[in-house]
Amino acid sequence: QVQLVESGGGLVQPGGSLKLSCAASGSSFNFYHVGWYRQAPGKQRELVAHLFFGGDTNYGDSVKGRFTISRDNAKHTLYLQMNSLKPEDTAVYYCNANTLSGSPLFPWGQGTQVTVSS
C-alpha cells in the first residue's frame, strides 16, 4: 500500500505562486495515474489536476492555464506548480493515485494547506 505525504503549502498573496510536492512510498506509485485534489471548507473534495500514466494531463476548468502537474519517477514524487493564485484556490490539497476517471486508490495523506489572501 502506498503512503502519501504532501508538502509545500502556505500563505500566499493573490497572484503569487506555490509548488506542492507529494512524496510516495514505494516505486509502484510510478505506474499509476495520479492526481491532485483539493477540499475547501464546506465543500467536497475535487480533482483539480490529473496526470495519466502515459503522460497526458487534464485540469479542472478553474485551474486550467494556471496549474501544472508533473512527476519525478526517480524520486517517486508528484508536483503541482500553482501560478496566478486566487483566493478561491484556498483549500487543503491532497495527492493520490487514481483510476482513469479520477477515483482515488489509496488512503489519503494529511494534505497541505494553501491559503491565498492579502
Image (cartoon, rainbow, N blue to C red):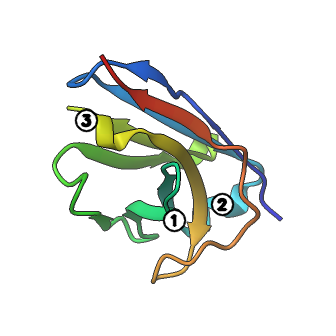
Q: Which residue is mark 3?
A: 86
Mark 3–mark 1 Cα distance, whole angstroms, equals: 19 Å
SS label for mark 2: helix
Q: In the rendered structure, which amino acid carries the disc numbered 1?
A: Gln
- Which callout, 2 or 3, points at the residue further toward the start of the chain? 2
Say which residue appears at 25% left-offset and 35% top-offset: 86
Q: Position of residue 15 (x, y in %)?
A: 20, 25
SS label for mark 3: loop
* Residue 36 versus residue 8 in the image, above or below: below
Mark 2–mark 3 Cα distance, whole angstroms, equals: 30 Å
Q: Position of residue 13 (x, y in %)?
A: 30, 18
Q: 78 or 74: which is nearer to us?
A: 78
Q: Which residue is mark 1?
A: 44
Say which residue appears at 35% left-offset and 37% top-offset: 81
Q: In the rendered structure, which amino acid carries the disc numbered 2?
A: Phe
The quadrant of the rendering that contains the C terminus is: top left
Q: Which mark is on residue 29?
A: 2
* Residue 20 versus residue 59 in the image, above or below: above
Q: In the rendered structure, which amino acid carries the disc numbered 3?
A: Lys
Mark 1–mark 2 Cα distance, whole angstroms, equals: 25 Å
Mark 3 residue crowding within 10 angstroms, few (<14) / some (14–19) / many (20+): some
